[in-house]
Image: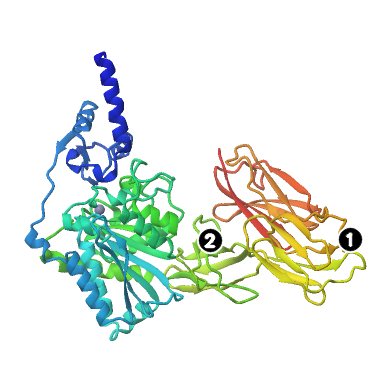
Amino acid sequence: MKKSLILAIAAALFSLTVQYIRAEEININTLIPVKIYITTHDDVYKFNALGVGIEELKDGYIEARVTREKIDELISSGWKVEGRTIEKVDPKIATQYHNYTQMTSFLDSIHSLYPAITKKVSIGKSVQNRDLWAFLVTDNPDSNENEAEVRLAANIHGDETVGRELCLAMIDSLTKVYGSIITIKDLVDSREIWFMPSLNPDGYELNQRYNANSMDLNRNFPVPDGSIGEDDTYNNEVETQRMIDFWSGKRGVLSLNYHGGALVANYPWDYTVVRCPDDALAKEVSLGYSRLNPPMYASTVFDSGVTNGWDWYYVYGSLQDWSYHVTSCLDITMEIGTKWPPASQLPSYWSDNREGMLYFIRQAGWGLQGIVTDSLTGLPINWASVVPFGIDKPVYTDTIGDYHRMLMTGQYDLIYSAIGYHEKWADEVRVRIDSVTNLDMQLAPILITGIVSDSGGGNPIPGALVEIVGLRSDTTDSGGTYQLRWNQDDYYSLKASAAGYTTVIYDSLKFENDSTINFSLSTDSGVAGRPGVNVFITRLEQPYPNPGRSGIHIRYQLAASGPAVLDIYDITGRRVKSLPQGTVPAGAVRTFTWDGSDRFGKKVSAGVYFCRLTALGIERSVRFIMLK
Ligand SMILES: [Zn+2]
């Protein structure tokens, strides 16, 4: 064989190996710690295309780990690259911290002293089989109460250790003074405070940033854009997956995760220049912490000690972005100084951060809250969504129906919805960021009712079985009537049967409104069922094209005849145009084209808009985007 062919085969084999290499086989020793000097801040946005993950952004350079080959490539394209040494921590100092064993027995001892207000949970095991501890401080820790959930986590980077000790110190303080200081008792009783002192216990024991598979866990979470981690090829590490499993089931409001290496409160997003829906709020709670941390607030690098994640440097796969995107829990990356300072400095870190921690715990329970229940049964509705109109970030109710939504002080229109229920708006609700506004909400279930009667004489048939096929059923009363809940977001068949009659089935039904479906059953077994009865629903479809440029088409249908109005709102909730539709007959599918002009005939600016259909006493709304 020719040499070039052999090389080609070798290259092909090599690329296969690289492609299928498993995470645990990556050897960190092949990556060299370097400083890469930058001239302007915009340089930090070039590293993703170069395949370089930023570990830290310093003054005038970034820190990263790259291969020998990558170093050559960077130098030849004009970057100044230098090796750097990784500081080793004096093991004598490290032992003054709580290592894994000490941390575990510390948590055990607190729990045995205060079992009524604490709970220790293992959310799973690390690569090296250490428990990932979550420690809850609240009254009645075994029951889910109407309380905001807040999370203080640390040590996702194994060598950034101060936050871990702050968590333990706060657990110690809260439990110790619970019985004697009334404000602390109130705080603990009215919040569910989750501490996660070490998200990467292996990294701590190994004295390294990474987990035991040499993976950076704060680059390992699903990214809101749909990719996974820094280069879209990472598999979720076990520590990441356990965190996802644990927190996805919660309705967390606010959280922080502690880091070291800088001194700044960093708020979402990390992965994109686009501002997050709660940008003003995210900045405000970051400032709230910073103001209570004098060295952070006095920062000469960051304005008032806070920064938007992307503005500082981009990160793909951070816990912060995942937490906010998937669970609606606003998460702040809290950089609090030196990574692993001597233990003698821990008291001063504690004094700098203690008030900020308490502020976070308090803030999580402020804003709008309430309980969402079923208007017929009074039972709580789980996973009902609450959206402030114009802020594209819902929060969801917990199993006992409670929701908690932090908001900047202001006036909001709120949309409450849940599968199987009529959407409900609460208009012009005044909310403050620094106190609690209570608003309970009852949602009416979507009901299907009707009469089952004899097709011959028209007499009602008592005892007939009416069934949403595969889901639930009701038996008709003496008047032949039935009632069923339609709490499905999908198509189902509705079937009526009675002894001596031919069964009738209506196929492919989906209801977004209360509806009456009558059945007329025949005793004549020669006639097949499935009569041609038209069943209509009120619906507003997603406008198209979306995004729209010169205009959009809006299609809708009404369940019954009546006047309809379409209104267009901008993202701030301001109505830009009203489009009366006149009286629309039942079941007719109408398409209306909006040319993108406001009430003065002027073309609206590019951005997010909402279309609201109002008819028959109900409202439907959909979101779309207009381009320039
Ligand atoms: Zn870190």
* Other residues around mark 2 within 10 Å, as few (<14) / some (14–19) / many (≥20): many
**Mark with earlier residue (2, 1):** 2
Picture mark count: 2
Q: Nearer the viewer, residue 238 or 595?
A: 238
Viewer-nearest residue: 573 or 525:
525
Q: Which residue occupies the extreme top position in the image?
A: 2
- Residue located at (29% from left, 86% from top): 179
Determine whether 508 is above or below 68 in the image: below
Is 441 left, or right, of 356 in this rendering?
A: right
Asked if residue 428 lies left or right of residue 368, the reply is right
Q: Nearer the viewer, mark 2 or mark 1?
A: 1
> Which residue in the structure is indicated by mark 2?
388
Q: Quadrant of residue 15?
A: top left
User: Within 8 Å: ligand 1 and the Cβ of disc 1?
Assistant: no
Tell me the tag on residue 524: 1
Q: Visible in this render: residue 337?
A: no
What residue type is disc 1 on? Asp
Q: Are marks 2 and 1 in contact (CB under 8 Å)?
A: no
613 lies above or below 364: above
Which image quarter is the N terminus in? top left
- Residue visible at 25% across and 72% down? 170
Quadrant location of the C terminus in the rendered image: top right
222 w.r.t. 69: above or below:
below
Residue 551 appears left or right of 301: right
Residue 412, x across and y down, in percent: 54, 63
Residue 10 in view: yes
Q: Along the line of sight, which residue is nearer the eye, 141 or 251?
A: 141
Residue 307 location, x and y as percent? Answer: 32, 52
Give the percent coordinates (x, y) of residue 507: 73, 54
